Amino acid sequence: MKDPLSQLDLPYVCRTPGDQEMVDIALANGLSPRAAEAVAAIDAVMHKVRRSIQRRDFGRRVLAKLDTTLEVAHLDTISAIAHNPVWTDQIKEEVTVGLIAERLGIDPSRASRLSAEVVERGYARRVASQSDARRICLELTDKGEQFVQAVRRNKWEVFAGALGQWKEDELVVFAALLDRFSTWSTDNDGVERSIENIKRQLADAR
């Protein structure tokens, strides 16, 4: 019996020189023509996802209806303050401006400004550290906690609603393959091979 997944249509890929080069490289690495097309399609979809994430259009549209004083950066800051899993028995980590900067990957001065703004808007408050009264930490207010829970639940409902249109076997296969795919950019051997490959190509171009 033929695998039904083999009958799936590939996502449409705009035929640019880059797309075709991706196909050619995949073919040179031993992939079949259909598999090479799939590789190019995956790359195109990844670009689409990255652009969507970078623009944060969905978040901006939601915030515009909920609280016009909030920007996406404020939502990130509120989430960084709330980033203490409630399903573990671990003691919650005290949240400082430095920790917010680390979690968001921004400089401390920007983290300090954003923290002050979410405090001003009533989503967080400053508290003294339990271990060092001289150190100021941040925690969510009731308003902030309710906001985080509502945003999280909405995300899960939207996610489940979108994927709820898929068949069970499609979801299981996609979850397994996505997990396998996610390791390509964090594999140390892959990183080292990439460095050497780029160095070689740069040397050949001289």
Image (cartoon, helix red, strand yellow):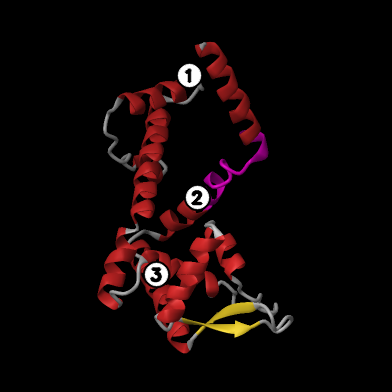
Residues marked 2 and 3 touching at CB (< 8 Å) = no
Q: Magenta segment range?
A: 176-190
What residue would you read off at disc 1? Answer: 28
State the SS at label 2: helix
Label 3 or label 1, whichever comes before in sequence order? 1
Question: Would you place residue 2 above or below residue 144 in this image?
Answer: above
**Disc with the residue nearer the chain's start (2 vs 3):** 3
Q: Which residue shows up at 51% across the image and 22% down it?
A: 29
Q: Which mark is residue 178?
A: 2
The percent position of residue 112, horizontal first and vertical second, equals 52, 68
93 lies above or below 19: below
User: Residue 37, how many percent across, how many down?
Assistant: 37, 31
Residue 155 numbered mark, or none: 3
Q: Give the residue displayed 41% in from the left and 21% down from the top.
A: 24
User: Which amino acid, mark 2?
Assistant: Leu
Q: Earlier along the polypeptide chain: callout 2 or callout 1? A: 1
Asked whether residue 183 is in view, the answer is yes
Q: Nearer the viewer, residue 107 or 100?
A: 107
Q: Which mark is residue 158?
A: none
CA separation, marks 3 and 1? 41 Å
Name the residue nearer the viewer: 99 or 157: 99
Residue extending farthest to the bottom is: 142
Is residue 86 in sight in this rendering?
Answer: no
Is 92 left, or right, of 82 in this rendering? right
